[in-house]
Amino acid sequence: MQTILIVDDDKAIRYSLKRMLEGQYIILTAQCGEEALSRIKAEPPDLILMDIKMPGRDGIEILKEIRSFDPKALVILMTAYGTTETAIEAMKHGAFDYILKPFPIPQMKELVEKALALRRWMKEGVSYASEGVSQGDEDRIIGRSPKMQEIYKMIGQIAPSNVTVLLRGESGTGKELVARAIYHHSLRSAQPFLPVNCAAIPDTLLESELFGHEKGAFTGAISRRIGKLEQCEGGTLFLDEIGDMSLATQSKLLRVLQDRRFERLGGSETLQVDVRFIVATNKNLEAAISNGTFREDLYYRLNVVSLTLPPLRERKEDIPLLVGYFLKKFNRELKKNVAGLTPSAMDKMIAYSWPGNVRQLENVLKRAMVLCQGEWIVEDQLHFEKEWERVEVEEERRGKTIEDLLDLFFNEVLTLPIPKGLDRISILERGLILRALQKTGGNQLKAAKLLGIHRSTLRGKMERYQITKEIILKAAKSPPG
């Protein structure tokens, strides 16, 4: 169970926070900074909740000292002084975040959960030896196959350097684990590790999350905010799903990679940062460059060292090892005593194509263990969800180029009659435009984006082909066939 230290001179605050969090975590308390330092040095907690205004040395002074002997310490500062710059400037000294008193309980709980999840990322090691099971808290990249042996070698070679690393591979192949392994074996392992999922944060917020913002930079920016780049000074920043980043944010990230400089949103001060970047994607970046959704210059900056993780279907010899690892893990977690899979069940696991890769295997096995009442998992207890089958089809379709699809119906198009005054290219172009407008409910901006053309170009083609709102609505109502 993770440990939280609450530091506040107000007994009522210590009591209410302890009541709110105990049961889920081990709660320790201290009523001043000096007492907190003694506790931290004796047994470092996973998270520190600390007030800024305290008798004697204030919270920011204590924060500086904590960070001097433990750069990876996670500290959330609490303050009753609304927009004071003191609390915001504390972020520069390594605070994970700050929260204003009085705070809503759900907001505090969410912040605590976020910090402790990050603590697990930084604290729990990742090993990549080929043995099947870890008895400790370490996560493990499992595999003895030749392809995985090459991955281990690459991790060992690139981890000690400061080069940017691009991790590629399908969803569920373990890119996050490899990123953590590189970090834990790097020369920056004593410094922070901050992950950012570019696909999980809206475009409008991602820039602020990375670069921070000044007060008044946009609606709702009521005070200065320090971004992940500043928080991660000296450490490693992991940008997951980099292929989903907007072109505007890509442009700003390119500058950071080039000269390690940036400005907060709405700010004019140029800041310099020392951060190592590890990025990951499941997208085809070369195709994204071709269709204009990813910057070619950024691609070359990121692709200093590229490491492609193999899908599980290409290393099926590792499936028994993975099964053994997850069996032991879930036996501990679920308090079960499942010995293994029957031969027919294991054959079913090996025969399956695993479109969701290791993540899917983990979920399938966990579900089977929940259902298993005996000592052995049988074939009928293994359920491969239809959702994964849908993903498999989508992945296969995504891999096809437009040329591949044209091959499927080109000969058929040649046999169709041509209306007077038109040609086959015009018919196809008009059809594509009409369907894009139908799909977007007549929204020209969205339709142009789908087609990969400018809005003004779309308007010109709509005039040429006499596509009106009435025609779009009529086509949408018409039954297929």
Image (tube, rainbow, N blue to C red):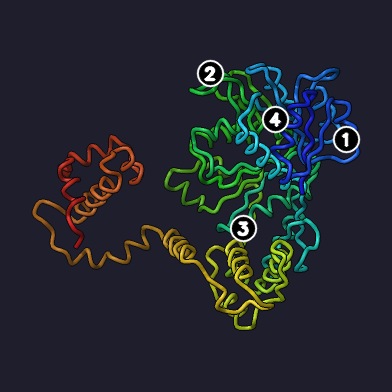
First in residue order: circle 4 vs circle 2: 2
Query: Where 344 falls versus 50 (above or below)?
Result: below
First in residue order: circle 3 vs circle 1: 1
Do the residues under discs 3 and 2 have CB atoms within 8 angstroms? no
Query: Where 138 falls versus 194 (above or below)?
Result: below
The residues tagged by marks 3 and 1 sit, at their Cα atoms, a distance apart of 44 Å
First in residue order: circle 1 vs circle 4: 1
Helix, strand, or loop for circle 3? strand
The residues tagged by marks 3 and 4 sit, at their Cα atoms, a distance apart of 28 Å
Q: Mark 3 points at which residue?
A: 308
Amino acid carrying label 4: it is Val
Q: Mark 1 points at which residue?
A: 39
Whether residue 352 is visible, yes or no, is yes
Q: Categorize mark 1 by other alpha carbons within 10 Å: few (<14), some (14-19), many (20+).
A: some
The residues tagged by marks 1 and 4 sit, at their Cα atoms, a distance apart of 32 Å
The image quarter containing residue 7 is top right
The residues tagged by marks 4 and 2 sit, at their Cα atoms, a distance apart of 24 Å
Q: Name the residue under label 4.
A: 273
Q: Mark 2 points at which residue?
A: 216
Amino acid carrying label 1: it is Arg
The residues tagged by marks 2 and 1 sit, at their Cα atoms, a distance apart of 40 Å
Do the residues under discs 3 and 4 have CB atoms within 8 angstroms? no
The residues tagged by marks 3 and 2 sit, at their Cα atoms, a distance apart of 42 Å
Amino acid carrying label 3: it is Thr
449 and 37: which is toward the camera: 37
First in residue order: circle 3 vs circle 2: 2
Q: Categorize mark 3 by other alpha carbons within 10 Å: few (<14), some (14-19), many (20+).
A: some
